[in-house]
Amino acid sequence: RPATVEEILTIEIKPGWKKGTKITFPEKGNEQKNMIPSDLVFIIDEKPHATFKRDGNDLVMTQKVSLVEALTGYTVQLTTLDGRSLTVPINSVISPGYEEIVRGEGMPIPKEPTKKGNLRIKFNIKFPSRLTAEQKA
């Protein structure tokens, strides 16, 4: 006689798990007469984030800067995924394609809990559409 059985299963999501990670509960799926119950499998997905994109264990963000900031220096102020405030001073000239790497500020590495990937900051330089004679000088 078929019956519905409710059971609460808990999944402890570990920091740094990647999209596609499978969690299997053996023999917790549907049951049929004279057969072993099937496995219940959950597959991890990632929610998009407004600031960061994931690339392996690295986090990538794009910061908009003006041409003046790109040439004279810029300080990136950001809030990390774990809520900390991070200040990253950029003292070199930011050219198109330049990427600042902050070691150890990326995603946690599940198999090595004390290690993290890197934070990669890319820059989108806003060029002016025209310059005044004074600016040209």
Image (cartoon, grey):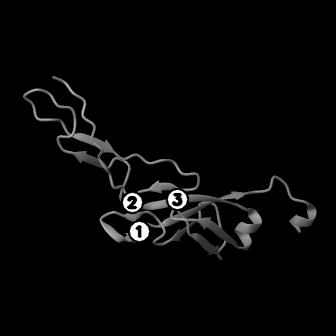
Q: Nearer the viewer, residue 39 or 5?
A: 5
Q: Is residue 2 left or right of residue 102?
A: left
Of labels 3 and 1, earlier in sequence is 3
Foreground mark, 3 or 2, reads: 2
Q: Which residue is mark 3?
A: 60
Q: Residue at x 28, y 48 (%)?
A: 23
Q: Which residue is mark 2?
A: 16
Q: Which residue is mark 1?
A: 116
Foreground mark, 3 or 1, reads: 1
Q: Which image quadrant: the N terminus?
A: top left
Q: Residues within 10 Å of mark 3 (few under 14, many from 20)?
A: some
Q: Residues within 10 Å of mark 1 (few under 14, many from 20)?
A: some
Find residue 86 and report its horizontal and vertical position in percent: 59, 71
User: In the figure, 28 relative to 16: above or below?
Assistant: above
Of labels 1 and 2, earlier in sequence is 2
Find residue 110 and report its horizontal and vertical position in percent: 33, 63
Q: Nearer the viewer, residue 40 or 55?
A: 40
Q: Nearer the viewer, residue 99 or 53?
A: 53
Q: CA distance from mark 3 to mark 2?
A: 15 Å
Q: Nearer the viewer, residue 90 or 113?
A: 113
**Toward which corner of the image does residue 75 lie, by quadrant?**
bottom right
Query: Amino acid under label 1?
Result: Lys
Query: Amino acid under label 3?
Result: Val
Instruction: For the residues labelled 3 and 1, say whether their Cβ atoms are less than 8 Å apart.
Output: no
Instruction: For the residues labelled 1 and 2, say whether their Cβ atoms are less than 8 Å apart.
Output: yes
Instruction: For the residues labelled 3 and 2, say whether their Cβ atoms are less than 8 Å apart.
Output: no
Q: How many numbered marks, from 0 up?
A: 3
Q: Is residue 62 left or right of residue 109?
A: right
Query: Amino acid under label 2?
Result: Gly
Q: Secondary structure at mark 3?
A: strand
Q: CA distance from mark 3 to mark 1?
A: 13 Å
User: In the figure, 133 relative to 47: above or below?
Assistant: below
